[in-house]
Image (cartoon, rainbow, N blue to C red):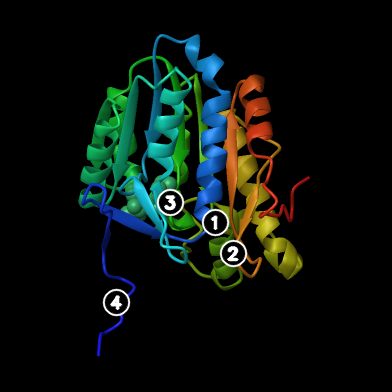
Amino acid sequence: MVKAKKTDEPVFDPADGLPVMKVGAWSEEKHVALSRYIDSARQARAKWPYASFIDLFSGPGRVINRESKLISDGGVLSAWRMSQQGGVPFNEVFIGDVDAESVQACEERLVAAGASVRAYVGSASSTVDEVLAALPRGLHFAFLDPFSIEHLDFEIIRKLSLRPNIDILIHFSVMDVQRNIGGDFKLPNSRLDAAAPGWRENLRLDAVPKHEQVGTYLQYWETLVSDLTKMHVAQRKPLFVNMNRGPLYRLIHLSRHPLAQKLWNTAAIPSSRQQSLFDS
Ligand SMILES: C[S@@+](CC[C@H](N)C(=O)[O-])C[C@H]1O[C@@H](n2cnc3c(N)ncnc32)[C@H](O)[C@@H]1O
């Protein structure tokens, strides 16, 4: 009898023999929104002598849909190819990941696709310093795509925001917040602390109905981000849902330039397969 393959077995792309990351179907929508934005920001990029793309949670660069088994480009490769197709490629792509094998695979793939790459292995909380030290002046776009909110250290955003011409797209895990917020509220330490320091001291969550708690935390995070970075949270914050329409994450765009906000608000219009439960 042939044994079924274990789901945690690594998968390799037959096209290049390098590892791919297993993702849910909803990941594709994220890459579509990201690529649409990169495409629409082409003219803004063209005005700058130097433009970079930064991804501190890059993964291996290619993903496999767990259900359909279809292999496709991950975030940074989609973004790079879109910038190239549009005729205004990023001058450099900065990647980082805590997993060395992923960084190596991602770098190889980007280089094969024609990108000029600087690669870093380590936690985003430390690679952010290395990237910023090496980053020339110019227009920058950072994509922060961690698996869980625990890794969305607020300091990463604060440090990136010190660059005057940067916008940041953030994967904000609504599901993580929803799972942990009730239990963590009274704990001395919480998985939600790194993303939104002080949330337990500043929010009267015991007075907030359960179904409003995630929204309250997100609002607190947004206030913290806008106050400390002087960046604006774009109006569109598309919510991505799973097969059972359970909320997974939002994509949140931060910038200082009104044009960047406008471009994101258009790029982020949810496709028919998604819903925007809390969008204004
Ligand atoms: C959601 S995946 C990234 C997917 C990728 N951005 C894409 O679109 O294809 C998250 C990645 O973060 C990495 N990771 C986990 N914790 C990290 C940390 N603290 N710092 C940097 N990378 C981390 C994981 O190894 C994984 O590759």
Give the mark toward the camera: 2 or 4.
4
Name the element at disc 1. helix
Instruction: Name the residue: 21% across, 51% down.
Output: 17
Q: How many marks?
A: 4
* For the residues bearing labels 2 and 4, Cβ distance under 8 angstroms: no
How much space separates mark 3 and mark 4, taking CA atoms?
A: 27 Å
Q: Amino acid at mark 3?
A: Pro
Give the mark toward the camera: 4 or 1.
4
Crowd band around label 3 with a 10 angstrom C-alpha radius: few (<14), some (14–19), many (20+): many
Task: Give me the disc on residue 242.
Answer: 2
Q: Residue furthest front?
A: 1
Label 3, ligand 1: CB separation under 8 Å: yes
How much space separates mark 2 and mark 4, taking CA atoms?
A: 24 Å
Task: Give me the disc on residue 146.
Answer: 3
Q: Amino acid at mark 4?
A: Lys
* For the residues bearing labels 2 and 3, Cβ distance under 8 angstroms: no
Residue 195, image x and y in percent?
50, 50
Q: Residue furthest bottom?
A: 1
Horizontal side, residue 64 vs residue 3: left or right: right
How much space separates mark 2 and mark 1, taking CA atoms?
A: 7 Å
Is residue 203 visible in the rendered image? The answer is no
Q: Nearer the viewer, residue 143 or 106?
A: 106
Residue wearing tag 1: 26
Name the element at disc 4. loop
Q: Amino acid at mark 2?
A: Asn
Crowd band around label 4 with a 10 angstrom C-alpha radius: few (<14), some (14–19), many (20+): few
Task: Give me the disc on residue 5.
Answer: 4
Of mark 3 and mark 1, the one earlier in the sequence is 1
Name the element at disc 2. loop
